[in-house]
Image: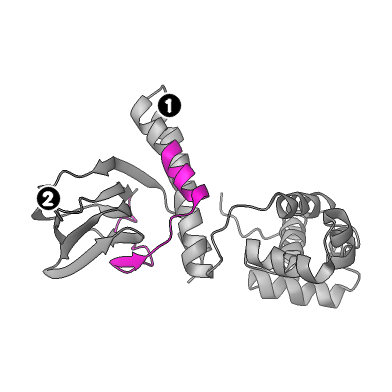
Amino acid sequence: MAVFEYEHLVPEVVLFVDRRCYPDWKIIRRRIDFHDLTFVVGGKADYYVNGVKHTAEAGNLIYIPPGSIREAHTYADSPMHSYAFNFLWLPPNNDTRLPLDTVTKFRLPGPLLDMIKTFNQIWMSKQPGYKMQARGQFLLILHRLLVTTLHRTDDLAPDPRIERLKAYLAENYAEDIDIGRLAQLAGLHPVYLGRLFKQQTGVSYRAFLNQIRVNNAEAMLAAGGFTVSEVAERCGFKDVSYFSNVFKAIKGYPPSAIAAKGWSPVKI
């Protein structure tokens, strides 16, 4: 399962709580019709989901899908502090579950915590258009969570050197680029840069570059006016056969499928 399988989903947050529990806090037992996504940052609580007890504490992520029977209570000597999102997927997708266990050990890193705090500011201030802004911010939170969970990348603070190189690759993808050139731009040893790039992005610089090249090639072919060979050259591929193989490996279909029929994978 990959992040792109969730790209068509549109969330609607129906409740957000910066939950700082009192010692006697509890959730009464009932069936929920929303997704409960709760980041526990302090204290401890017992959640009962469909009759099964789950103990959640600081560093845990709770996920309860719609249709579940949920109840919970905190510990009097260690009241829970959490950030809780109750949300729906807009029709007809509300039954689509996130790929998470009921309780997952989860280190809430600074960047994601900052995203949640930004959401809190948007949600509580309720400025004009806040629902649109909140939806966008929640999508950023979900994206970061899914990338971390599905692709097992270390959820580290973005390295500004890697961010600059990503922008450089997106702008100069048609040029002949190797790791040595990138290392010079970043002021790093090529071997160290290779490790750092993969740690930050989850993929090698070459895979990242090929993704950009193929996405641009797909757009050019869909627009028409270019042959496969011309597109390959304009997108930085010296060998059209290699281009076709890389394109098919990434997209699942050959570039000729677009060029021959004027076909576009995007339905409008």
Along the polypeptide, which appears first: circle 1 or circle 2? 2
- Gap in angstroms between the C-alphas marked 1 and 2: 33 Å
- The image quarter containing residue 230 is bottom right
Q: Position of residue 229 (x, y in %)?
A: 88, 67
In the image shown, does 239 or 99 lie closer to the viewer?
99
The image's mark for residue 26 is 2
Q: Is residue 68 visible?
A: no
In this figure, which residue is indicated by the disc labeled 1? 129
Q: Which residues are magenta?
A: 91-118
- The image quarter containing residue 60 is bottom left
Q: Position of residue 54 (x, y in %)?
A: 20, 67
Q: Is residue 136 magenta?
A: no
For this orientation, the residue located farthest to the top is: 128
Residue at (48, 43) in percent of width and height: 114
Q: Secondary structure at mark 1?
A: loop
Residue at (64, 61) in percent of width and height: 200
